[in-house]
Amino acid sequence: MAWQSNTVEANGIKLHYTRTGGDKPVVILAHGVTDSGLCWAPVAKALEADYDLIMVDARGHGFSDAPENGYSPDYHAADIDGLIKALGLQKPAILGHSMGAATSLALAGLYPDAVGAILLEDPPAWWIPAEPNEDEGQKRIAGMREWAASLKQKTREQLIEEERARTNWSDDELEPWADAKLNFSENVLRVFGASNAAQVDWAGVIKKIKVPALLIYADRDKGGIVDAESAQKLAEMLPSLQTAHIANAGHSIRRDQLDAYLKVVRAFLQEHAR
């Protein structure tokens, strides 16, 4: 079955998505900042025989609307809740990467009846409160913002070649990754605002999550965000959480170690996706 693309009105904006289709359990795929829905294409191709994958362009990314404001996790969660309602979905699973993982976590707590299970690929560890006026943290956020802004100064070919030299990613990963980097709105840079994460009471939200959850994390020395300590902290806050460490991978775990990633995702979805 050919994939279909369409839009819905959700939370006051137009959200674009691509859907594999079929009468199968639904899994929503929520991408990271500066990516787009089709950055999930390799995962969707691997899973489409068993699942109906919905690859959403977050606000400001891909072909979705790019309002000036509203890039904090609570807005992203409301967007996905609106998508679920607009498509008439019944408690789909949601698999999110980075920003999309934070969206998934917020969605499950703020809208506890919306989803049936959540899978988190290396989210920002916002459940651990940051120290006030933490210089190192502010420098990191500023550096990420500068990195995201610099992507716009390069051609598609430059982006692909530079990332190919830095990683072992396949062309199936590199091409949609580069396309996404050229298409996101500069309004998305608000994600890197110092107060962005603080729009959500993470401790309060996480306490409200009742659905099965999986945290997939990698190696800090290769660029991963979550480590064993922060994974354990989330597990203490969220009793339904399972954790899976994938070695020799950085922040983009699925791109670095696709086979190992799919193994843990499939095992979780087989048990919890309906």
Image: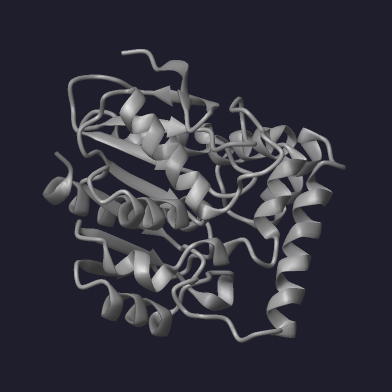
**Percent position of residue 170, x then y:** 55, 42
Residue sitting at x 12%, y 50%: 271
- Residue at (81, 58) in percent of width and height: 146
- Tell which of 189 and 109 is nearer to you: 109
Residue sticking out furthest to the right: 153
Residue at (77, 66) in percent of width and height:
143
In the rendered view, tell whether residue 49 sits above or below residue 263.
above
Q: Give the x, y percent position of residue 251.
A: 53, 62
Give the left or right position of residue 217, taking residue 251 as reference. Answer: left
Which of these two is toward me, 53 or 86?
86
At 69% from the left and 59% from the top, the residue drawn is 192
Residue 61 rendering spot, x and y as whole percentages = 62, 35
User: In terms of image quadrants, where is residue 52?
Assistant: top left
Instruction: Between residue 60 and residue 204, name the one nearer to us.
Output: 204
Give the image location of residue 73, x and y in percent.
51, 54
Q: Locate residue 31 relative to residue 24 in the image: left or right.
A: right
222 over 2 or under it: above or below: below
Residue 156 in sight from this viewpoint: yes
The relative height of residue 41 versus residue 204 in the rendered view (above or below) is above
State the quadrant of the N terminus: top left
